């Protein structure tokens, strides 16, 4: 299946956690290298009279959002909310060891200091990164929160030299399938179809069918 668009559906090109004047680019690189203040991507700001300047101001509802790396201390809060957010038992998929060893490739979105979304991902090798789990508070869906998390992960994967990102979902989760398609991820062809969707039987070792998505970084 081809990509749905040749544009930038994840918003990676405009996504940033910090913005500095162009002349302060060396300092920005130092901040990024040291991951100071949760820096993931620093966007140089051109001079106002630059002929190529484009208005890239964020949507108003994103202004109070802050994205940062996971902390081990986030485990207790995630465990307390994830089943309620998803409507079924999901906590077993998020062991505490994740918060200790894959913090730099996992992210939390906060609004006014409260966690409203998170993404758990990791780099498998030099070629591929994997998004393991995404949770978004029900009251904060359809606001670009999930898209912002994916953009942060894709940017991190790109910085680490990965060529592609993969993730999975259930063939009965139509909302998830539609979300990933909107972001330009393609369905990796499986061995049979369920409800008109190509699936991989027992892909996650749990005996269940999974839809596998992939997108090049």
Image (tube, rainbow, N blue to C red):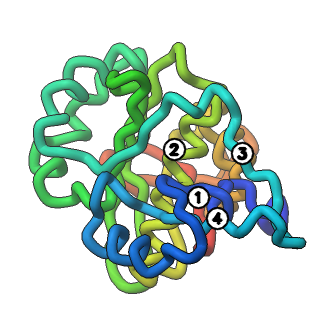
| 6 shown above or below 171 | below
In-front residue for pair 208/150: 150
Q: Residue under circle 4?
A: 45
Number of other residues with Cα within 10 Å of mark 2, as a class: few under 14, some 14 to 19, many 20 or more: some
- Whichever of callouts 1 and 4 sits on the residue coming sooner in the sequence is 4
Could you tell me which residue is drawn at 56 percent across and 45 percent down? 148
Residue 119 visible to the viewer:
yes
Q: CA distance from mark 2 to mark 1?
A: 8 Å
Q: Nearer the viewer, mark 4 or mark 2?
A: 4
Q: Residue under circle 3?
A: 57
Could you tell me which residue is drawn at 74 percent across and 46 percent down? 182
Q: Residue furthest right?
A: 51
| 56 shown above or below 171 | below
- Whichever of callouts 4 and 3 sits on the residue coming sooner in the sequence is 4
- Whichever of callouts 3 and 1 sits on the residue coming sooner in the sequence is 3
Describe the element under mark 3 as helix, strand or loop: loop
**Image coords of residue 135 (percent x, y):** 42, 33
Describe the element under mark 2 as helix, strand or loop: strand
Could you tell me which residue is drawn at 12 percent across and 37 percent down? 73
Describe the element under mark 1 as helix, strand or loop: strand
Q: CA distance from mark 1 to mark 4?
A: 34 Å
Q: Quadrant of the C terminus?
A: bottom right
**Image coords of residue 13 (percent x, y):** 67, 65
Q: CA distance from mark 4 to mark 2?
A: 38 Å
Task: Give residue 169's mark.
Answer: 2
| 167 shown above or below 3 | above
Task: Give residue 213's mark.
Answer: 1
């Amino acid at each position: 299946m081809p990509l749905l668009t040749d544009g930038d559906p994840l918003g990676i090109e405009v996504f940033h956690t910090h913005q500095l004047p162009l002349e302060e680019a060396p300092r920005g690189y130092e901040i990024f290298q040291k991951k100071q203040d949760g820096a993931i991507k620093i966007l140089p700001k051109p001079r106002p009279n630059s002929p190529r300047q484009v208005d890239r101001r964020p949507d108003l509802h994103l202004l109070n959002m802050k994205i940062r790396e996971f902390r081990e201390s986030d485990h207790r809060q995630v465990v307390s909310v994830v089943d309620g957010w998803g409507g079924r038992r999901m906590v077993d998929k998020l062991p505490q060891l994740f918060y200790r060893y894959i913090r730099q490739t996992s992210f939390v979105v906060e609004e006014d200091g409260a966690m409203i979304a998170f993404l758990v991902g990791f780099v498998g090798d030099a070629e591929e990164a994997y998004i393991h789990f995404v949770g978004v508070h029900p009251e904060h869906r359809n606001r670009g929160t999930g898209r912002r998390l994916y953009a942060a992960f894709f940017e991190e994967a790109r910085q680490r030299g990965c060529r592609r990102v993969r993730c999975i979902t259930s063939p009965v989760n139509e909302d998830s399938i539609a979300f990933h398609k909107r972001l330009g991820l393609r369905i990796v062809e499986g061995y049979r179809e369920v409800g008109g969707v190509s699936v991989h039987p027992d892909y996650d070792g749990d005996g269940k069918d999974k839809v596998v998505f992939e997108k090049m970084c």
